[in-house]
Image (cartoon, rainbow, N blue to C red):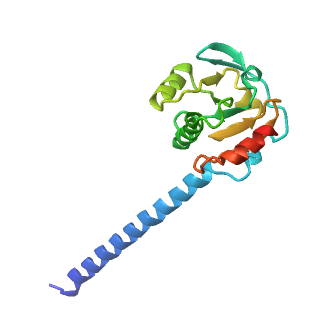
Amino acid sequence: MNVSSPLKMIALAVGVFAVGIAGVLVGNTLRQTVRSDAYVAVDPTATTLLREGMTFPDADTHGPTGARRTAEMIGADGTVFLFLDLECPPCVDMAAKWQGVLDGGAFPGLDVVGVTNQDADAADAFRREHALSFPIVQDTKNVYLGEWRVQRFPLEVLVGADGRIRSLSFDSVSPIDLPRLAERLKG
């Protein structure tokens, strides 16, 4: 029996184990990097045709209170439209962040509206599961998804009372800067 053979086998096993552990660590780091980059983008204009300063496009929607146009949902103090994929974790974070603003009462006239391409039952279940007080409406004709290329989620669009887009963001993790929000709403 060759004594060096078992030692070689042990060394090989330890090497394979070390490479496997390193692969898992590198894979987790890459997955976290991709995940955060995928949902926190500096430049929303790279993925959508919506732009700051333009009039928010009007579209038919259907929600808990029936059919409504998005132009009818723009409140006297502004409206935040949250474009959501109801199965993406960052969308949950974005919705919770804005629910916190509503619960905090700092902007009592600000409206928040979720917009999705998913069906009404899924939207209602999402709303209930995450204790959201704002409506989630369906983009019934896929105007935003198709015509305006809203295809990356979540997308937050702040619209002033005048109907103009004040800001766009994919950032689902940073806290909302309330003084800056007030400044943007004033326009």
Name the residue nearer the viewer: 140 or 129: 129
At horizontal 55% and vertical 38% (from top left) the residue drawn is: 100
Q: Nearer the viewer, residue 98 or 89?
A: 98
Pinpoint residue 176: horizontal percent, then vertical percent. Answer: 63, 46
The image quadrant that residue 115 belongs to is top right
Which of the 4 quarters of the picture holds residue 52?
top right
- The residue lying at 65 percent from left, 34 percent from top is 83
Residue at 70% from the left image edge and 36% from the top image edge: 150
Q: Residue at x 77, y 46 (%)?
A: 45
**108 left or right of 30?**
right
Residue 75 in view (yes/no):
yes
Q: In the shown orientation, is residue 35 left or right of residue 147?
A: left
Front residue of 93/48: it is 93
Up/down of 125 relative to 23, above or below: above
Most distant residue in the left direction: 1
* Quarter of the figure with the N terminus: bottom left
Q: Is residue 49 visible?
A: no
* Residue farthest along the top direction in this orientation: 66
* Farthest residue, direction bottom: 3
- From the top left corner, tell me how far across and down residue 105 is, in percent: 60, 34
Query: Which is more toward the observer, 161 or 46?
Result: 161
Residue 84 location (% of width, % of height): 60, 34
Number of numbered discs present? 0
Instruction: Give the percent coordinates (x, y) of residue 71.
Output: 77, 22
Q: Quadrant of the C terminus?
A: top right
